[in-house]
Image (cartoon, rainbow, N blue to C red):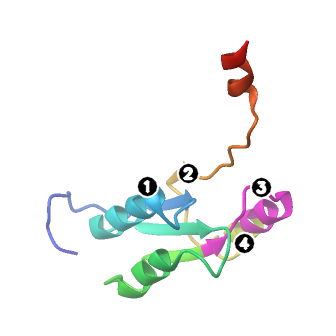
């Protein structure tokens, strides 16, 4: 790990729900550069190409692990939690970023604006 602008500490483990693009992807990128470990989720294994490329380019093997988790499907969330418990049970999770969600129209905010 290069000295860079970050202090030399033991790496933290971050889980980013919704890491395939946008702010979630950028969080993952910066955390890996900082020397932390990231478990990033995608809702579709065939999407999130930028996250897969980031994983392949990471200087430290295992710095980024990619898991499936679609927050709109309860079984997907339950499976993700079980995988984290069993596969990743060898270490603790220090931080969780929930960066996934679904905004459906019409919704309560639209109803408030029209009344």
Q: Do residues under tags 2 and 1 come within 8 Å of each other at their CB atoms? A: yes
Labelled pair 1, 4 in contact (Cβ < 8 Å): no
Tell me what residue is drawn at x 43 percent, y 83 percent. 53
> Which comes sooner in the sequence, label 4 or label 2?
4
- List the residue tagged with mark 4: 83
Q: Is there CB contact under 8 Å for labels 2 and 3?
A: no
* Precedes in sequence: disc 3 or disc 1: 1
Q: Is residue 82 magenta?
A: no
CA–CA distance in space, label 3 to label 4: 18 Å
Disc 1 is placed on an element classified as helix
Q: Earlier in the sequence, mark 3 or mark 4?
A: 3
Q: Position of residue 20 (x, y in %)?
A: 52, 68
Mark closer to the chain start, 2 or 3: 3
Q: How far apart are labels 4 and 2 at the CA level?
A: 19 Å
- For residue 23, the mark is 1
**Marks 3/1: CA–CA distance:** 19 Å
Residue that numbered label 3 is attached to:
72
Q: What secondary structure is found at the residue carrying circle 2?
A: loop
The residue singled out by tag 2 in the image is 99
Which contiguous range is marked in magenta?
67-81
Is 105 displayed left or right of 64 in the figure?
A: right
Work out how far the residue at label 2 is from the one at label 1, CA to CA, in angstroms: 8 Å
């Amino acid at each position: 790990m290069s000295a860079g602008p970050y202090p030399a500490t033991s790496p933290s483990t971050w889980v980013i729900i919704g890491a395939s693009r946008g702010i979630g992807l950028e969080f993952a990128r910066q955390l890996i550069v900082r020397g932390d470990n990231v478990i990033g989720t995608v809702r579709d294994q065939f999407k999130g190409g930028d996250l897969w490329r980031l994983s392949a380019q990471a200087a430290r093997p295992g710095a980024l692990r990619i898991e499936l988790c679609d927050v709109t499907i309860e079984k997907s969330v339950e499976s993700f939690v079980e995988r984290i418990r069993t596969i990743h049970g060898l270490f603790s999770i220090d931080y969780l970023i929930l960066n996934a969600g679904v905004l459906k129209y019409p919704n309560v905010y639209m109803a408030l604006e029209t009344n």
